[in-house]
Amino acid sequence: MPRMSISPRLAFTATFSLGALCLSALPAAATATPAQIATSKTNGVAYLKSLQASDGSYAGAGLSNEWAFSALASAGTAAVDVTPGGDTTKNARSVYRTLLATAGWPSATPVVTDYERASLNAYAAGIDPARVSASRNLVADIYGYWQTAEPGYFGPSANFNGTVFAALALGGAKTQAGAQRTPQLLRDALVTRIRANQHNDGGWDYGKAEGNPTQLAATSDIDMTGAAMAALCVSGVPNTDTDIAQAKAFLKSKLVPTSGAFNAMFGVNTDSNGWAVSGLNACGINPQTGDFLTSAGKTPVDFLIAQQFNPGGGFKYLPSDTTPSAYASIDGLRAVAGGGFTATPPTPSTGGSPQWVAQSAFTSGTATKLAITVDDGAGGLKVCSVAFTPSGTTTTLGTVLDSATTTATPTGCVSSVTPATGTGTITALNGKANSGSDSWKVSVDGSAFAGASRAKVINAGDTIALRWGA
């Protein structure tokens, strides 16, 4: 059965700017030529377009094809340009945005990977993840799964892939202007946990290994190694880092010389190869040269292109398969196109369609959420999602912090604010007072930190970071 269909891989349904993550052009010396890659992309996009339902959707109940948005964007196709039979009213972006804004989405028992998957694909589709609708903020949804007792993990730590994809989503789904919307301290906390889970062989697996010698000594998974590498790099870790070098060595050790495939846990297959190549792409490591050019002159990209049916454009999961797989086609195209686990949305070709769509203002009386981090300047980081109901098209920092004292998830993010009323400068937060040049400052969507006041205007979808210091 396809690799995407087994249960660990399905942690995104039950339980990928990044311009920096997309290497759209490979050197002429690479074994797969630019012409071959261009043909693969063209045919692969055509196949993914054929997966669109008659109502314009890619996503639905259970395991669905929404990862197509990251693959399409990596290949240069805007989701808003993908329509069933040319019906622009049912374009893929609009239909996906409507789904994400639905009150019942994703389910009655959501898990963090639901929101991480959606953030990566919404971003690639040209939907600001923090501003999907008046009520939906995917970044805030993710923040709500911060593990206070195990800082740096998102969702139960045993499900380690939830933390890896938190790093991919929070570091990869940037602002519309291409800025990091989450503070580096939060991304550093994720990096620390990802490093702690690296197995002795240099790779990673879906489950938690930190603190467990037996798990750390276990053989790693190709797929998760690609995702964890990408998570580190999008969080600011350079590709010269020792842990990235060890991951590269692990992947190299799994190369099959005659084909360029990676010998994965479930055997040679397109999905595992796709995830590994996307990890290399995300780190700016060319998968067609150096360590990944085999003695027989083959590379992982060669293998992926060999798995593609042409002119049909779909990719088969196993070399022995005679029909294409939707999931293999998505993973294969994204990797061949040079993508990581998301991509900056391309400029649409449909006239009048913007690159981005986003909720521009709060809707008075409609409950929503905002994402907040609080850094006490002494290594204590608090992360939470704050639920509140705005009374106008904007709100204030004071109003958001007041709400956080009672409606934050997880609790304890904000315990007290001084002053408790009015519009003045915030002089103390969580019992820690301003002292000389050290004071509470605020950043919104990655802006420079500046003095925090209760009157500061907060707009729909703003990601708020508070920090004590000079």
Image: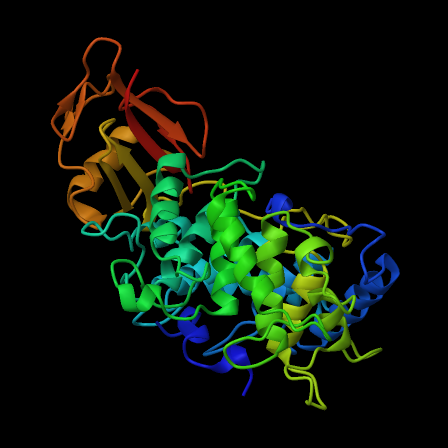
Q: Position of residue 320 (x, y in %)?
A: 69, 89
Q: Quadrant of residue 342?
A: bottom right
Is 383 displayed left or right of 166 in the figure? left
Q: Quadrant of the N terminus?
A: bottom right
Look at the picture and state if 49 lies above or below 405: below
Q: Nearer the viewer, residue 330 or 317?
A: 317
Point out the residue furthest to the top here: 436
Look at the picture and state if 27 lies above or below 227: above
Is 108 displayed left or right of 285 in the figure? left
Q: Residue at x 68, y 82 (%)?
A: 316
Point out the residue furthest to the right here: 35
Q: Position of residue 44 (x, y in %)?
A: 75, 70
Q: Position of residue 211 (x, y in %)?
A: 25, 58
Look at the picture and state if 383 lies above or below 8: above
Q: Quadrant of the C terminus?
A: top left
Whether residue 133 is visible here, answered yes or no, is no
Look at the picture and state if 72 lies above or below 308: above
Q: Quadrant of residue 460?
A: top left
Q: Residue at x 88, y 60 (%)?
A: 35
Is 132 displayed left or right of 322 in the figure? left
Q: Nearer the viewer, residue 363 or 369?
A: 369
Q: Position of residue 305 (x, y in %)?
A: 76, 71
